[in-house]
Amino acid sequence: MIGKRALLLFSLLLLLLVPGCGGDSSTSAGTQAGGASPPSGVPAPKDGFEIEGEEDPLFGFFREAAPADRRAVSKGLVGYMKAREAGDWKTMCRYIAPREKAVLQIEAKKRPELEGASCEGIVAALSGSAAQRKNTMTGPIDSARWAFSRALALYHGSDGNDYVMPMLIHYGDWEVGALAPEKLE
């Protein structure tokens, strides 16, 4: 099994390396970001999330978001997770950041059955069964660690596990940077 640090770093690396492309700049699915960077002097979070390597220079630039910014990140993820559980592919695509859509297009090119598929078709094929798409959120996120236009939304799941979802700001809206949240171990 791949470790949580490797998955988080891989997700962050993808977010940094894949160029922002695709999508419609007039999206209204996400939520407005409150600022351009996290507030300075914010102490390390004490929210119950133990993230290995958090103080690592590659990861440690993320800081806890202010409450208003955490609510904005949360609103975007909550909307996405509800659409995901319902199998509402069109709404899911409105919440997916362009960088993630570019990754999905690359994945679709590797699968002949997805050649020429729309975002909705790709998401439907890659999202798994209804049981795999179960919404594990019980309400808003518990923590948002962010820097610049990226955030990690963290929440305590209804199944007793902790989860993280990469999020990105796109034209002022918070959108997801992966198809599914990752379980923290």
Image (cartoon, rainbow, N blue to C red):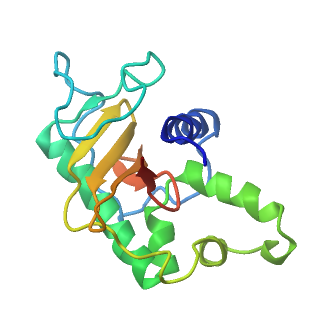
What residue occupies the far right of the structure in this picture?
112
Q: Is residue 107 above or below residue 133?
A: above
Image quadrant assignment for residue 38? top left
Q: Residue at x 35, y 52 (%)?
A: 173
Q: Is residue 130 above or below residue 170?
A: below
Image quadrant assignment for residue 116? bottom right
Along the line of sight, the residue nearer the viewer: 119 or 161: 161
Q: Is residue 65 above or below residue 163?
A: above
Q: Is residue 55 above or below residue 153?
A: above
The x, y position of residue 160, in whole percent, is: 28, 61
Q: Residue at x 66, y 52 (%)?
A: 103
Along the line of sight, the residue nearer the viewer: 158 or 13: 158
Exactly how many numbered labels are in the figure?
0
The x, y position of residue 96, in whole percent, is: 49, 60
The x, y position of residue 140, in whole percent, is: 20, 60
The x, y position of residue 98, in whole percent, is: 55, 52
Q: Residue at x 21, y 36 (%)?
A: 65
Q: Residue at x 41, y 30 (%)?
A: 52
Residue 40 appears left or right of 52 = left
Q: Is residue 62 visible?
A: yes
Q: Is residue 170 visible?
A: no
